[in-house]
Each structure stands twice: as C-alpha cells, then as structure tokens.
Amino acid sequence: MNKMLSFTLFLLILIILESNIFSADKPNIAIAEFAARNVSEVDAVAISDIIRIELVRINQFNIIERKNMESILKEQMFQLQGCTDQECAVKMGRILNANLMVIGTVFKIEQIYHITADIINVETGKIERSERVQCNRPQDIFSAAEAIAILLSGGKQARERINSFQIQVNEVIDNKRVVINKGSIDNITKKSIYKVFDEDFIETGYLKIIETKPNTSIAEVLKSKKQIQTGYPLKYNSKEYGYGIGMYLTTYDLLINLNIYDKRSHSLEINLGAVHGESREIVYSYPCFVKWYLTDFYNDISGYLGIGLSMVGFYSSDKTFASISPVLNTGIIFFANKLIHFSTNAIYFINTSRLDGQLSSYLWFNCGISIHY
C-alpha cells in the first residue's frame, strides 16, 4: 500500500514538473486592443478578445488575461486602448512582463473588412510576425479573427480556415466558366457581377453568375487579364449600373444623349435633341430608346439593338409640324469597358407623318464619343 502511494505521489510530481517545464518554455504574450478604422470600437475590442481566446485554445503561448492587463496597466496609469505602434507595444509589454505583444487594426474599405496584426518582440522591439486577413461579409469577421490568430501562431490550418469564409473560385471548369464556393443560401444571385483578384490581390477580371445552387454557383468569365486559378478571391461589384453622356455627329446633325445603363444587359437612353442643316427636311427629333446589348459592358466591343419613340419636327416656309414616330436603333460600341467609348450608330424612323400627310421613313447614320461612368 505504501509502495502504491509513493508511486502515485511520484507520478503527480512528474506531471507537475513537466507542466511547469512546458509552461516555462512558452513565451508570455499580451494582446492590446485593436485600433478601429471605419468600424466601431466595440467590434475592434471584440475581435481582440476573439484572437486572445483562439490563442489560448492553440496553447502555444502563455496568454496574459485581459483583467490582469487592465489591473496592472491601471496601476501604472497606462491605457490598454490606443496602443498601435511598436514603441507603445514595447512599453506596454515591459509593464506586463510579456515577451511578446500583439497589436493590430480592424478597418473596412469598399465593404471589405481587413484585420492586420503584428507580433512585437518586447526585448528587441522588432516585428517577429505580421499577418493580414480579409472577408467580404460582416458575419464572417469573427471567423477572420480566428484565422489570424492561427496565422500568428504559425498554424498550417489557417489557410483552410480563411478559405471557408472568403468568396473565391472553387473550381475552374474551362476558360469561360468557373465554380465559386458560395451559393443561394449565401445570397448569391444570378447575373450578379464579381471582380476577381489574383494571389497578390491584384484585380484581374470580372465574373457573372449564371447558375446558383444552395452551396455553390457557376460563373461566366466576362473578362480576365490572366488565367483564373482555383483559390482566387472575389468581391461583389456594386457598380453594375451607371450613366453617361455622349455626342454623335453626321454631315447634317448633332445628337446629344443621356443614358442610364445596366452593364450586364440593357440601358435606357434619352436623346436630348438633334439639330439639322437646312438641306434636310427634319428640323429636330427627340428619340428615346430602350437598348439591349449583345455582350456585356465588360468587353472591349459591345453591339446593341434598341427600340423606342421619337418626336420628329418638320418645317416649311409657312408652318411647322411635329409627329411621334417609332424608331429602331442599332450600333457598335468600341472600348465599352473604358471610361470613353467610341460608337457607330444607326437610327431608323418608321412611317413618320410629313407636312403633306404622307408617311416617310428616314435612316440616319452617325458616329461619336460618349463618357460612361
């Protein structure tokens, strides 16, 4: 019995000594409150706490608890918040008797959330590790915080965690179609446009959703500067609609137009007026069209077809006459994906009433430039 008791005590002593040895090998680390840029302070504090909790779970560091940090820093009249540079991190780390400090920032740019974090060596003042994670949706920001904690600890599983919340290319079907890792349950809708970025987060093209499933979607490649690869991140393109102003010229007329357009398929165009030389019978016209584009505005060249109505005015030496005429429109836009477009255009006025009561049709050809935003 005594031998059994002695053996049990011996094992307990070994376990305690072993845990102390391993604990001594792990560096002390403290996490400062992250700075907030274009997000709330509450969110930034919550992200700091999530990173602290995740580092505790990873069990690679001795984490200094938030309450202990607040108590020690309060005694030294040192603020927990607002410490975002290396010099401040070193000062805070020395007060807390920490070997390492984590400082960082949470910010939002164009609806994309970014979390940056640095591990500062308190003794040397140098950055030992620097990481950045981003996500497209507010509900994914806490998963992003967990992922950056794994990155800070050097865990290989971090990339898998990041991939689980980021909208990205999941599979390349062929040169024209890809599968993305989000579907209808993630509010992905058909005809939505997404920007696609390469591994260095440089914009490389556009995708259009053509089919949605609950957990995945199929997208058509509208434009790409390079071959799209699996894992490329996507960002929803909020500028699917735009507006423009243009000027078209022929030998006899000057046509000014305004248009509101959907870059994916169609537009509403209002032509403010046309002025014609005296050699033509038509004095003025105000054609308005609804146009359908044969290709997207994300291509270099886009053909279109349009239909609409126009007020057409005639004149003679003693009277003028105005009538309403149906119109057809067709043309080609060059440099459709650029700010300044060049287009050739044809407008066909159908069965327009003349001063003498006869019906005539007119075909105009013109070309010009327009600025689209």
Image (cartoon, rainbow, N blue to C red):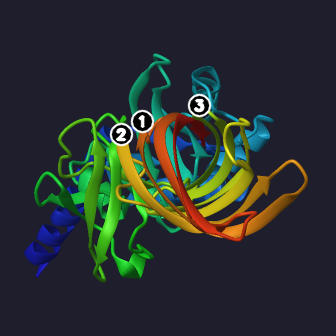
Judged left or right of residue 299, residue 12 is: left
How far apart in space, not on screen, are marks 3 and 2 (Cα)? Answer: 27 Å
- State the separation of the CA atoms marked 1 and 2: 5 Å
What x and y, as percent, mark residue 125? 50, 18
Residue under label 3: 251
- Secondary element under disc 2, as helix, strand or loop, is loop
Mark closer to the chain start, 1 or 2: 2
First reached walking from the N terminus: tag 3 or tag 2: 3
Quadrant for the N terminus in the image: bottom left
Kind of residue at disc 1:
Phe
Front-lying residue, 41 or 226 = 226
Question: What is the quadrant of residue 32 in the picture?
Answer: top right
Q: Residue at x 35, y 42 (%)?
A: 301
Is 338 or 118 nearer to us in this picture? 338
Q: Is residue 200 visible?
A: yes
Q: CA distance from mark 1 to mark 3?
A: 24 Å
Q: Nearer the viewer, mark 3 or mark 2?
A: 3
Q: Which residue is mark 2?
A: 300
Q: Position of residue 155 (x, y in %)?
A: 25, 48
Locate residue 47 relative to residue 195 in the image: left or right: right
Q: Are marks 1 and 2 in contact (CB under 8 Å)?
A: yes
Q: Is disc 3 in contact with disc 2, using a CB cutoff of under 8 Å? A: no
The local crowd at label 1, few if under 14, some if 14 to 19, many if 20 or more residues have their Cα within 10 Å, is some
Residue at the image point whose x is 23% and y is 54% from the top: 157
Q: Residue 124: image x %, image y %?
A: 46, 16
Q: Is residue 237 left or right of residue 23?
A: right
Q: 236 or 263, which is in the foreground?
A: 263
Can residue 17 be seen in the rendering of this structure?
no
Foreground mark, 1 or 3, reads 3
Residue for badge 1: 335
Classify the position of the C terminus by image quarter. Answer: top right
How many C-alpha atoms fall within 10 Å of the one at disc 3: few (<14), some, or many (≥20)?
Answer: few
